[in-house]
Image (cartoon, rainbow, N blue to C red):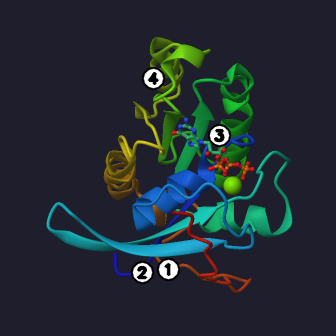
Amino acid sequence: MNNPLLIPIIGPKEVGKSTFTTQFIFSQFIEEYDPTIESYRKQIEIDNEILIVELYDFYQNDYLIYGFTKEVYKQSHGFVLIYSIIDRNSFNRLQDYLKEIYLIKNSDDFPIIIVGNKNDVENLRQVKKEEGEEFAFKNGCPFFEISTKARYNIDETIITLLREIRKYPFDSKSNSNSKIKFKFKFKIKFKIKFKF
Ligand SMILES: Nc1nc2c(ncn2[C@@H]2O[C@H](COP(=O)(O)OP(=O)(O)OP(=O)(O)O)[C@@H](O)[C@H]2O)c(=O)[nH]1
Ligand SMILES: [Mg+2]
């Protein structure tokens, strides 16, 4: 796998999709940054193999997918689906996101990892860890609680997903394959406003 593995970071509003992306790529918790940034690449070594990961950060991905978003879904190799443990509504939306993936990928065992973010704020918790675990288990997905603020379980999330992607028989089962051919050209912009 020498081509980039495209991984959309999806989930309801304000669950931490952008902070997940910037923590994984830059090891920085960036609270405010340019929302026009769309994708980032990073090289990662896993099980003695070098892979290029391309994370696609969706901006307020709280709508039904169409157009460009649909194209990214179609071409992707795996998904990070995020909810916030301090926002029960975000947890309740997970099934809708899974349905959309299953529909577009024409498969209900596509590589997806489910993560409950913001576990650094225990006092505001609305979703128990066991609920997240049970939901993920029922849907055959790996699960972690994470904190993008504390950089907790961020690399573990991507590594676990990459191992799932490795196991998935892309060529025979899905409309995605190891060669990413985008109809649309990705704009990779690095206009980041770092806040120190
Ligand atoms: N305490 C805490 N706050 C977090 C964490 N991750 C994100 N936040 C905060 O949650 C808010 C939303 O984070 P974003 O990363 O912008 O969320 P998003 O999913 O990209 O949001 P949209 O793109 O607007 O849908 C920001 O105010 C972050 O500072 C976390 O792990 N812990
Ligand atoms: Mg965002």
At label 1, the amino acid type is Lys
Residue reaching furthest to the front: 196
Q: Nearer the viewer, residue 173 or 89?
A: 89
Looking at marks 1 and 3 on the same chain, the residue that comes earlier in the sequence is marked by 3
Does the closest atom of ligand 1 sit within 8 Å of the Cβ of label 3?
A: yes
Observer-side mark, 3 or 2, equals 3
Label disc, if present, on residue 26 of the rendered structure:
none
Q: How far apart are labels 4 and 2 at the CA level?
A: 30 Å
Q: Tell me which numbered mark, 1 or 4, is placed earlier along the sequence.
A: 4
Which of the two labelled residues, at mark 3 and mark 2, occupies the earlier sequence position?
A: 2
Residue beneath label 2, please?
Answer: 3
Is the CB of mark 4 within 8 Å of ligand 1? no
Please state, as top left, top right, bottom left or bottom right, where the N terminus lies in the image: bottom left
> For numbered disc 1, what is the local secondary structure?
loop
Residue 141: where, in percent of width, then height? 46, 34
Residue 137's label in the rendered image is 4
Residue drawn where x is 54% and y is 20% of the image: 135
Residue type marked 3:
Val
Whole-percent x and y of residue 181? Answer: 61, 83
The residue indicated by pointer 1 is 179
Q: Position of residue 69 (x, y in %)?
A: 76, 63
In front of the other: label 3 or label 4? 3
Mark 4 residue type: Phe
